[in-house]
Image (cartoon, rainbow, N blue to C red):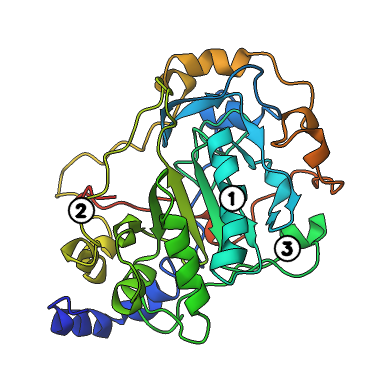
Amino acid sequence: MAFGFAQAFRTFGRLALAGAIGAGLAAGDVVAEQKTPSPGSAKALFASVSLPTQGPAQPIGFYAKGCMTGAVALPTDGPTWQAMRLSRNRRWGNPAMIALLERFSQDAVKYAGWPGILVGDVAQPRGGPMLNGHSSHQIGLDADIWFTPMPAHRMTAEEREDLPFTSMLQKDKFLTVNPKVWTESRARLLMLAASYPEVERIFVNPAIKKKMCDTWTGDRTNLGKLRPIYGHDSHFHIRIKCPPGAAGCTPQAPVASGDGCDKSLAYWFTPAPWAPPKPPKPGAKPPKPPREMMVSDLPKACSAVLDAASVASMQAATYGGPSAVSALAAAPAAAPADDDEGLPDVGPVPNDKPAIQ
């Protein structure tokens, strides 16, 4: 695939940004600065709730500004999946999302030659903004899948907390997939995930999108669902559409037609997305720091969601019923690891970033 800016890219590389960015933000080795939320903020309040609400499942609001009712938990273990980072208590989702994850895990073994999936964050018990790591994942319709294959043994809770991420990128090159790590089975896994009609888009690192554009020789019908974005070099992010009948769910605009191997991808290989903010003009007032998101900033129904009665137990709200609950107990809450899950899903978005995601 030729983007038509090879010379500009080479010049950009000579600016020594290849190493600094390629081994940093793009490779997911930098943790975004996270301000500790105040006790009354939406982050603090939603993160403090350990169980979902009773009643029917409803996503409320938008993926990055909302909450949910009636969530169910992905069982920690299944024949073809294992849930990771259990201490985060983020394996809750809309039943449509959890059902897709189970189906995808089975299809990955059957059709993609994958031994099973490792599932990262889905959402908190009642959705809402998380203390760290994500700007979306708020209505139970987003889920992270590791590029690391599921091991043959059932991991302990400690192993699930400590297993390191594996970046698909080379640390010494700007936005370049590491050929020693990337495999055809990972490409098949991505395209399988994109094949489901309910999947709206899949977020991947720009280098991975480019790799798929350059090398995927199969059906490219769903290639456009792979959307380039910051981070996402050791995992990919599945987002599904608002389920039928979910009147309170705010849909995202559909992806543009085509395979996405065009100027919208070429943009990520220019200095623009990675440039630091322009300094203020002399004498100009410094910009105000971003205001914390409060519950009042979310859809009105989210306040009631926080106050609603909880289900009786995690077992009662596990997808598939109490019999599906693994005997593996979640570890006590722990501080987030220093990895690319600490990066926000939408990173430091520059003002001129195209609204194509």
Q: Quadrant of residue 62?
A: top left
Q: Position of residue 249 (x, y in %)?
A: 40, 26
The residue to which callout 3 is attached is 162
Q: Amino acid at mark 2?
A: Ser
Q: Position of residue 149 (x, y in %)?
A: 63, 69
Residue at (52%, 15%) from the top-left corner?
303
The residue to which callout 1 is attached is 103
| Residue 344 in sight here | no
Q: Toward the viewer: 97 or 167? A: 97
Sequence-first tag of 1 and 2: 1
Sequence-first tag of 3 and 1: 1
Q: Which quadrant of the figure contains the N terminus?
A: bottom left
Q: Secondary structure at mark 1?
A: helix
Q: Position of residue 224 (x, y in %)?
A: 29, 58
Q: Quadrant of residue 107?
A: bottom right
10 Å neighbourhood of mark 2: few (<14), some, or many (≥20)? few
Residue furthest to the right: 327
Mark 1 in CB contact with mark 2 (< 8 angstroms): no
Q: Toward the viewer: 55 or 22? A: 55
Left or right: 110 in relation to 271: right
Check the image and report above or below for 224 versus 11: above
Tell which tag, 2 or 3, sits nearer the viewer: 2
Q: Toward the viewer: 217 or 98? A: 217
10 Å neighbourhood of mark 3: few (<14), some, or many (≥20)? few
Q: Amino acid at mark 3?
A: Asp
Q: Toward the viewer: 313 or 246? A: 246
Residue at (60%, 67%) from the top-left corner?
165
Left or right: 226 in relation to 179: left
Q: Amino acid at mark 1?
A: Arg
The residue to which callout 2 is attached is 257
